[in-house]
Image: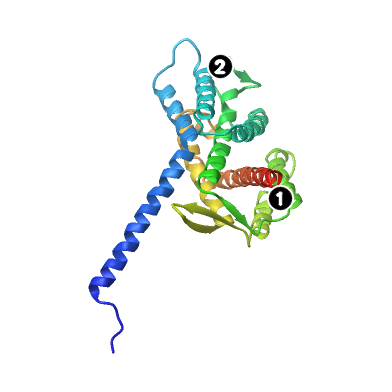
């Protein structure tokens, strides 16, 4: 007796799965697009002000005004919550401190003029770090992100602090980013992130999500430097692709960002219980 399905039923089953996959991808992409509104505005502003010279004020100052208005508009419209604004402000300050130090050490530069520059760093630069936090916060909320096998708070906090400090200390001491990367793999080897798309819950290894986000931020960095957001020493004469080794730096920065956002989300969740 042949229990196999007729070809027509197989075709319908495959077609149904394909349609569901397309629908799920659409919903996932739509939520991702909404979560990326702030980064998109940043890149669009960088491109437009690079092509068209802004009037009255220097370019860096216009970028700061645009990003401030965008931040206000997102909170006003409900795209961002006030709690998310607090997290984003924290990232702005963390990023600005790192920018001031890195520019002082000659890692990169902001060569254009601007009234809103502090110690050689335009204030708009902090928004590029804040945009990472904006994406993480909004994607977390829209996709109902949950963490599985999350390590203890003190371990996560210590690792995040060590990664951030290494961005400063490697100029004077050995660079331990690869040791820290190894600790990340060991610490989060059994950790997963789950997310909800159109009523269905999926999961992904946390380490893989770090790598994917870090890679796409490296792609975004190439776009940003192409439009003159900042420049590395090897880009002073002409633009060139950012070295692939920078992925490791962005990967660690993403990990710090994710750990901070995850910790704040968990603290808020515990308070609200």
In the image, residue 101 above or below residue 189: above
In the image, residue 113 above or below residue 93: above
Left/right placement of residue 199 relative to residue 176 reads left
User: Alpha-carbon neighbours of circle 1 within 10 Å: few (<14), some, or many (≥20)?
Assistant: many
The outermost residue toward the bottom is 1
Q: Position of residue 50 (x, y in %)?
A: 43, 24
Q: Nearer the viewer, residue 2 or 245?
A: 2
Q: Position of residue 5 (x, y in %)?
A: 28, 77
Residue 151, image quadrant = bottom right
Q: Which residue is under mark 2?
A: 114
- Picture colour scheme: rainbow
In the image, residue 220 above or below residue 152: above
Residue drawn 60% across the image and 35% down it: 84
Residue drawn 34% across the image and 63% down it: 17
In the image, residue 9 above or below residue 3: above
User: How many numbered dots are placed on residues in this image?
Assistant: 2
SS type, badge 1: helix
Q: Nearer the viewer, residue 83 or 68?
A: 83
Cα separation between marks 2 and 1 = 38 Å
Q: Which mark is residue 45?
A: none
Residue 1 can be seen, yes or no? yes
User: Alpha-carbon neighbours of circle 2 within 10 Å: few (<14), some, or many (≥20)?
Assistant: some
Q: Which one is earlier in the sequence, the residue at label 2 or at label 1? A: 2
Residue drawn 56% across the image and 42% down it: 136
Q: Position of residue 182 (x, y in %)?
A: 66, 56
Q: Which residue is under mark 1?
A: 156
SS type, badge 2: loop
Residue 240 can be seen, yes or no? no
């Amino acid at each position: 007796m042949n229990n196999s399905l007729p070809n027509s039923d197989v075709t319908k089953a495959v077609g149904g799965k394909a349609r569901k996959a397309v629908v799920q991808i659409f919903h996932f992409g739509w939520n991702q697009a909404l979560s990326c509104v702030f980064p998109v505005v940043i890149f669009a502003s960088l491109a437009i002000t690079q092509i068209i010279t802004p009037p009255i004020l220097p370019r860096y100052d216009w970028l700061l005004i645009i990003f401030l208005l965008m931040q206000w508009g997102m909170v006003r419209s409900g795209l961002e919550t006030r709690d998310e604004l607090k997290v984003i402000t924290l990232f702005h300050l963390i990023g600005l401190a790192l920018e001031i130090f890195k520019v002082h050490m000659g890692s990169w530069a902001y060569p254009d003029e601007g009234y809103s520059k502090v110690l050689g760093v335009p204030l708009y630069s902090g928004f590029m770090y804040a945009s990472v936090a904006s994406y993480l916060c909004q994607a977390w909320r829209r996709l109902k992100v949950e963490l599985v096998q999350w390590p203890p708070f003190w371990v996560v906090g210590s690792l995040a602090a060590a990664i951030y400090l290494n961005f400063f200390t490697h100029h004077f001491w050995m660079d331990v980013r690869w040791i820290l990367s190894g600790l990340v793999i060991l610490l989060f080897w059994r950790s997963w992130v789950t997310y909800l798309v159109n009523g269905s819950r999926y999961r992904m290894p946390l380490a893989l999500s770090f790598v994917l986000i870090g890679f796409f931020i490296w792609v975004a960095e190439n776009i940003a430097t192409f439009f003159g957001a900042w420049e590395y020493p090897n880009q002073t004469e002409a633009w060139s692709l950012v070295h692939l080794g920078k992925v490791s730096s962005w990967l660690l920065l993403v990990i710090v960002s994710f750990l901070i956002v995850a910790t704040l989300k968990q603290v808020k969740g515990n308070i609200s219980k």
